[in-house]
Amino acid sequence: MKSNQKLTVLFWHRKSKADNKGLAPIFCRISIDGFNVEFSIGKKVSFEHWDPSSKRVVSGIQAKQINKRISEISTDLDRHFAMLQLQHAYVTPMMVRNVFYGLPADHKKGNPKQIRTVSCNLLQLTEKYIADFQTMVTKGLRSAQTLRQWRATYNKIQEFVQHEYRNMDIEIKEIEYSFASRFYRYLTIERERVIGEAAAKKQIKNTKQILTLAESEGYIEKNPIQRFRCGGDDTDILPLELEQVRSIWEKEICLKRLEEVRDVFVFQCFTGFAFQDVYALNVKHILNIGLKQESWIIKERGKTGVPEMVPVMPIVEEIIEKYKNHPCRTVLGRLLPVNSNARYNGYLKKLAVLCGLDRELNTHLARHTFADMMLNVMGFSLEEVSKMLGHRSIRTTQRYAKVKKNKISKTWENVREKIFTPEGKLRTIS
């Protein structure tokens, strides 16, 4: 039943709460029948930018955004009040505020704790996250390579905010779902140096993680881009066939630097080590295990800290022996002569052309090739491949290694005679 109650919404500038920069918060007052309740809208402006008569911001770089927020709050409060009137015989200002904050109308606590009144900007929170991540890297709990990726994300968010909003930062409460799709479009189409779809989705995934942090910290009610899909439709990386790896390995190369790059790439194809891990390998990572004292390479992944262990295959042993007197081993203490990631991938492109391949080579392709060969050529189980790759979850391994028809065919050959007679009849199995 709808009553004759009237709602009044007033926005005012609380000068007594001004900070040392002269910025004071904007408050909203909900009044019904002489009773009222107040809350901060999470915005601050200086005295000269606030117009007491119109109750709006008249100047400043965020004037448009703040005024838009004020209008949205007014509309939301009117809507919630109208709905409450249909449900209750008498509506109080506290009931309206509770529903506005996503609480039950009869919530008793005075101050909703879901949303902080202190505002926070996107880059500001990203900086804080990176600083905390840096501390974990220092303590050996996180990878330095992942830290570099987070800093790259920060730079790309900063680029986008300046491009899209003509501002140095954006308040988290102002971010809407369209932020993700516009950010994705910027990275893949509009940016001067565009990046691939998978790389762009990684940046959005990281941004989504920051906004999830903002939600858990109480800066926003819910992550506005949570529903944006960052995975599931990624293009599978087609691994190299064993014959292609063999042709790369047997190719005569005159340029010494390119030959070293080729050897490191083939080493990756038969060990599955990622770039940062093969870069950090030394002789201490080679261990002799078991009664036969077989050689294994065992190392914790730099990215996850999960141990990865692979047997030293003859071709890997040959490459290790080849560089025993190389300066990389005698001077730097590294197992192989590995360039910087950018230079290494640059040489791999030249190597692909030299070997007559119709596709580019890169460090991550070698890891996918290893997973494919272990599963489909050598017959290791998915669980064993997962262990060799140092994955935390077998679900990750499933993205690297897909079961091929030839593996199914081999398995069928192994079990056919056990199940069926030469005439095709089912055998009696005890």
Image (tube, rainbow, N blue to C red):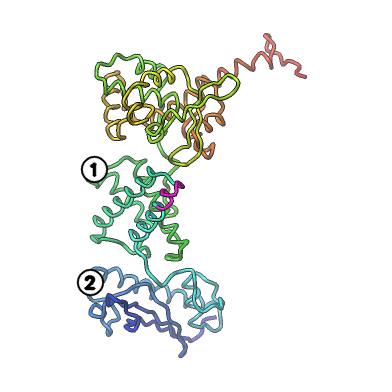
Badge 2 element: loop
Inspect the image, locate mark 2, and give the three-letter code of the amino acid beneath it: Gly
> Which residue is found at the position 53% from the left and 24% from the top?
288
Q: Earlier in the sequence, mark 1 or mark 2?
A: 2
> Which residue is found at the position 68% from the left and 14% from the top?
420
Could you say where residue 366 lies in the image, as x and y percent from the top left? 40, 28
Numbered tag placed on residue 60 in the rendering:
2
> Which residue is found at the position 23% from the left and 80% from the top?
48
Magenta residues (range): 135-141
User: Could you classify mark 1 by the number of other residues whose Cα lies within 10 Å: few (under 14), some (14-19), or many (20 or more)?
Assistant: few
Could you say where residue 374 lies in the image, as x and y percent from the top left? 50, 24
Q: Quadrant of the N terminus?
A: bottom right
Q: Quadrant of the C terminus?
A: top right
Real-space Cα separation, disc 1 to disc 2, in angstroms: 32 Å
Badge 1 element: loop
Inspect the image, locate mark 1, and give the three-letter code of the amino acid beneath it: Arg
Query: Would residue 319 be counted in the magenta stretch?
Result: no
User: Could you classify mark 2 by the number of other residues whose Cα lies within 10 Å: few (under 14), some (14-19), or many (20 or more)?
Assistant: few
Could you say where residue 419 lies in the image, as x and y percent from the top left? 69, 17
Q: Which residue is mark 1?
A: 193
